Amino acid sequence: MRPSLPQLRSLLKPAELALLDAAITEATTSGVPLWLVGGAVRDLALRRPVHDLDLALPFAAAPFAAAVVARLGANATVEDESRFGTASVRFEDARLDLARLRSERYVSSGALPEVTFVDRVEDDLARRDFSVNAMALGLAGEQPDVVVDPFEGLNDLAVRRLRVLHPRSFEDDATRLWRGARTAAVFDLAPDEATARLIAEGARYLDTISGDRITAELKFTARRGRAGRTLALADAWGILRGTHPALRLDASTGRALQHRASHVPFEVFMALLLTPLPERTAILERLSASRAITTAVEQAARLIEAGAGDATPEVLAGLAGVTGDARTAARWLDPERQPALQSDLGRWERTRPPLDAEELMRLGVPRGPALGVALDRLRRARYLGTLGTRAEARRAVREWAAQEWTVQQRTVETHG
């Protein structure tokens, strides 16, 4: 299970390998220590694909990133976040994230940390959340190809244990609860006794976290995989209730996500989570949800409600144009009734009146509201199959026009 640089190189795509080689060459030439940190080291230990190349060094990241780009050539670009001591290098379809080694201090629960730059990788690892995420692999410097594991994360991986690094971890930053649920779900870990106790106690600190930050954690959950298992743990651990008292994992959501182990589109994921809950509007407000999320949730709820009744043209007209995300979420939540409803909805959306507005006016329908009424009648009749040909449609319009004329004439006679 011990990660190694040759193992890392064997798992990378060509563009990722080019980025890594350029960074190692630059660090070696410049005499700069360089480490692979975070989830990539954990993934190497578990013989899993590496998704993120996160490197750390004891100097400013931006100048180093610029030097890496110079080695790669014109196809590489830098994104500089100097105020955070970070920078990113993009090359073709790959990305390399660089960060200056740092320690963090939290003044109050939920606040962003005060950052101090440090020289030792062990000090940087000490600020992280769980032991399995607090390992580093030397890439250049005095410890090439050496695993730095001050908190015995490799041992925890071997026994499938989730262990938090310090007692105030969740009090300092309660978003770590969401990261813990994801890590446990994806890698089949179980919290040790002390971590389980801290999780139970730490859920109350979630109300110090802004809606935007919680939504970001939910987005990571949808993208990371095994979202259903993550939500089940978040529900069992009190993370959902801590986020909002009415937030819970509905049985229909659990079933919808049960066999979907890979990425779930975020708007679909949010609609799956919130649509079955009566208090979804309040939860959306707590999460500072975007318009796209709110729309997906509201429209999925309308589809679910419509699936319980008759799919009349009036009902279908009210559903026309709902987003694909809402339709997907509704199908997953209600696989028995939604296929028929959405088939009818698709047929309604494809149905057009057999006559256009110009022809209707030639047949005596006046411009204005009556024209819209006639077009709606024709569309409804074609959808229901009561009008087969354009000739039948013209006869029907003449009859409607005559009836309307008769009604109008009687009204004039009545009122003199």
Image (cartoon, rainbow, N blue to C red):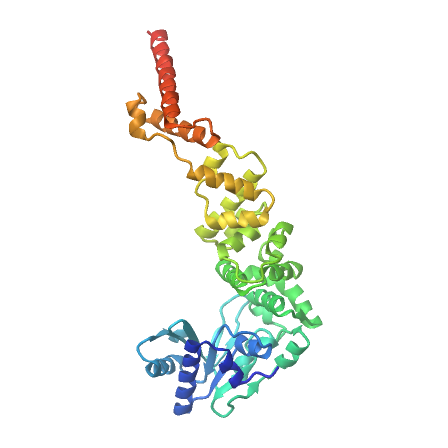
Image x and y of residue 10, in percent: 50, 81
In the rendered image, the quadrant that contains the N terminus is bottom right
Residue 63, located in which quarter of the rendered image? bottom left
Instruction: Count the numbered circles shown.
Output: 0
Left or right: 202, with 19 as reference point: right
Image x and y of residue 59, in percent: 42, 84
Query: Does the rendering let one see residue 94?
Result: yes
Residue 178, located in which quarter of the rendered image? bottom right
Question: Which residue corresponds to the image point at 54% horizontal and 44% vertical from the top-left?
Answer: 301
Of 365 and 295, nearer the camera is: 365
Query: Does the rendering let one see residue 248?
Result: no
Residue sticking out furthest to the right: 193
Left or right: 315, with 393 as reference point: right
Residue 367, located in which quarter of the rendered image? top left
Image x and y of residue 310, in percent: 56, 33
In the rendered image, the quadrant that contains the C terminus is top left
Asked if residue 62 is positioned above or below residue 228 in the image, the reply reads: below
Question: Which residue corresponds to the image point at 60% horizontal and 62% vertical from the top-left?
Answer: 230
Of 313 and 276, nearer the camera is: 313
Image x and y of residue 334, in percent: 59, 46
Of 189 and 235, nearer the camera is: 189
